[in-house]
Image (cartoon, rainbow, N blue to C red):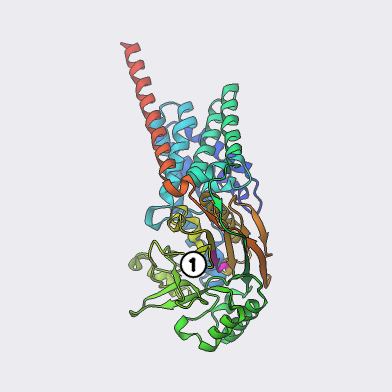
Amino acid sequence: MAAAGAVTVFAYAPVRAFALMWLGLAVLFVFAGKAESGKRAAWQGYAWGLGYFCANIYWIFISLHTFGGMPAWMAAGCVFLLAMYLALFPALGAWLGYKLGGNSWRRMAISLPAAFMLSEWLRGWLFTGFPWATVGTSQIPMTPLAGYAPIIGVYGVGLILALSVGGLAAFARKPAAWAGVLAVWLAGFGLSYVAWTQPVGKPVSVSLAQGAIPQDEKWAQAHYLDNLRIYLHLTREAKGDIVILPETAIPSFLSDTPDWYLDYLRAAVEPRALVTGVPLSGPHKEEYYNSVMLLTAPDMPLYSKHHLVPFGEFVPVPALFGWMYHYLNMPLDGFTPGAAKQAPFKIGPTTRLAPNICYEDVYGREIINALPQATLLVNVSNLAWFDGSWAAWQQTQMSQARALETGRWMLRATNTGMTAIIDEKGQLIKVLPERQRAVLEGTAQNYTGETPYARWGDWAALASGGLLLLLAWLSGRKDKARAGKAIV
């Protein structure tokens, strides 16, 4: 079971062998659906989840050990402990699906897929959530199921995928099952051609800078001036009307950054717009923010990161986990969260740019907070913490999902990769190679309007999953009632 979960890592970018997710889910649903007890089904789900998460979050080891300085054995242990926690969610889904399904075919076809999706949503919400590697994301943008993303989001895509796999696992010999699945997938293909949002204004030229500064140099005082020069040089090279620098491109608090450097940055682009990542200190002691600023506007509007990274940007339950920081060298590990809703940057007559920072783009329900005002999305990140892994590819695929859900172009400006331009259909338009110091030049189209997902969020998917579980449970009760009457 663990191998069936682990192999799904190849369903995501960069490999994108999306059919492996079908196989992994089929193994889970068959074994859990035919288990002899709910407890046994839960263990099947737990083993599957342990393999799934060990394979999909292995890159955390790099940040803890290679760049954080934690001993290898301890870093590996922390990653495994996190995987053990995350595996509880597919275990819960398997147990609940088994208990409510009644018989094996109903479990595989209805209750296990629905319970699995609900457990995924719970994983993405509980204790601030960790929705990395949701199964629906693995199908975006390559399969017809991507057409459902603007309506019901990635959790809805995952539900339809799980129902398709579970239905075929339960009724593989029945042509009607294959015909039903084919019809649903063809409908998704048709939906991919629906224009949920509308372009506004002319395309705007954009420049996305990628400094390729190694993580062990980014915060080193000896490299501070060199790092400033790198992004100043890239800014001077940029040709776009909107120039975007990545997360903490300025590696010091704005109040500690030399005024002459900020003046040079402005002079390099004016009268165009410059957006840059920079940490800000607040009015109170130990209050500071991971922020993005429109440096060329007179009032310098800013966006401060709302959804902070546990253990990276804040310490959850310090009494329980504070010991870890004796073994870690983590700069700026005590950020303050920004507001949940923040106004997009007004640039020119049509562009309303909504920033998000680092892994905030894995939270679809939060990205839609900027709509419908925002016409363009931008993610600024520093993924040098995970260099040498697939983390940047995986996160880019999640950005593609956010573009589809919102019907907006997504720009990604990163320190080491993947810097990219993504259109409103989730397609990669242009990408810079990882660890290459360069400026990605291109154009982006502003969009207006709202997709159904932007209006409903995850509620449509949650309601669908809950209703399916209820129907499976009621159907199982009817079967028991009939069986009791037959005995009498």
Q: Quadrant of the N terminus?
A: top right
Q: Secondary structure at mark 1?
A: strand
Q: Is residue 157 above or below residue 436?
A: above
* Residue 111 % position (x, y): 44, 33
State the image quarter where residue 394 is shown. bottom right
Residue span colored magenta: 379-383
In front here: 454 or 247?
Answer: 454
In front here: 128 or 144?
Answer: 144
Using the rendered image of the protein, determine whether residue 89 is visible from the camera's viewpoint: no
Residue at position x 37%, y 32% in the image:
470
From the viewer's perspective, is 382 left or right of 333? right
Q: Is residue 270 above or below residue 45?
A: below
* Residue 459 % position (x, y): 40, 44
Residue 97 belongs to the span the image colors magenta? no
Q: At label 1, which amino acid type do we have?
A: Lys
* Residue 105 % position (x, y): 48, 26
Q: Which residue is mark 1?
A: 346
From the viewer's perspective, is 152 left or right of 203? left
Residue at position x 45%, y 55% in the image:
371
